[in-house]
Image (cartoon, rainbow, N blue to C red):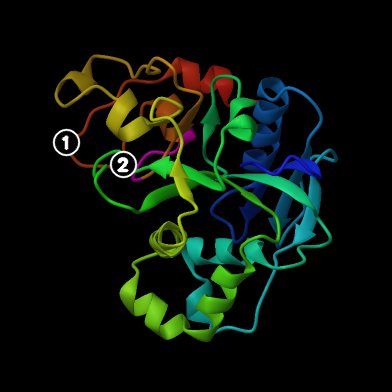
Amino acid sequence: MTDKTGDRFVICMKWGTKYGPEYVNRLYGMVKRHLTGPFRFVCFTDDVKGVRSEVECFPLPELQLQASHFDGGWRKLNSYQADLYGLKGQALFLDLDVVIVDDITPFFEFPGEFPIIKDWKRPWRVTGNSSVYRFTLGAHVDMLDHFVAHQAEVRRKHRNEQEYLSHYLHDQGKLVYWPKEWCASFKYQCLPRWPFSFWQEATIPPGCRIVIFHGEVNPPDAIAGRRNKALSGMKPTPWVAQHWTE
């Protein structure tokens, strides 16, 4: 059962120099166009420069862990703190490089304690893709505490943060998966198969609400028709340019 109390948050994280403020600003713009009703948009970041004023920026939540344990997606685990800057309610986490193409209101209405994306290529796996997931703020501090207490063991056992959280919550009976149509992989579901990708444009699959970019292509690459992989053609994708705007 989804907890309806508190505010609705859309949250993201930005650190380092890989993604500029335009990613945050465009993500906010897409959410505003595609989410019905009031919401608060929060970005946890180490640099607020250039981020639009409607976005609530907070410092990246930190813990006293080894620096190597904060690389990549492992930083997301800090969003499960018991008191995250006093924020209370339901939070929809979105990676910065997703492209929203349809109404995302159902992501707040879908039942389940922790919905996440089902793996597209290996659907038999428990591990979900953490580009889009929803949780109650402050509800999973035990998962963070377990990581803090057993971080070396967790890192040996699990390849990344999404594998760890998926198995931890699955073992508790709390993990569920979004309807498979809602979150489409640009790489696996939008791009035509090789060699058709050389002359056919990528398309939005029926029922898709959010397009996930992972691997060698990000939204600017899709717009330009630039695939950073040898012998893999891709035509420019106008619909990404249409949706990926402030």
Q: Nearer the viewer, residue 13 or 116?
A: 116
Which residue in the structure is indicated by mark 1? 231
Report crowding for label 2: few under 14, some 14 to 19, many 20 or more residues within 10 A (C-alpha): some
Report crowding for label 1: few under 14, some 14 to 19, many 20 or more residues within 10 A (C-alpha): few
Was residue 216 drawn as part of the magenta stretch in this picture? yes
* Residue drawn at the location 48% of the way across and 63% of the way down: 72
- Residue 138 on image: x %, y %: 70, 61
The quarter of the displayed image where residue 4 is located: top right
Query: Which image quarter is the N terminus in?
Result: top right
* Residue drawn at the location 27% of the way across and 42% of the way down: 123
* Residue drawn at the location 84% of the way across and 60% of the way down: 86
Is 188 drawn above or below residue 131 in the view shown? above
- Which circle marks residue 228 in the picture? 2
Q: Nearer the viewer, residue 3 or 187?
A: 3
- Taking the view exactly as shown, the residue that stands out farthest to the left is 195
Callout 1: SS: loop
Is 16 drawn above or below residue 180 in the view shown? below
Is 216 drawn above or below residue 188 in the view shown? below
- Residue 229 on image: x %, y %: 25, 42
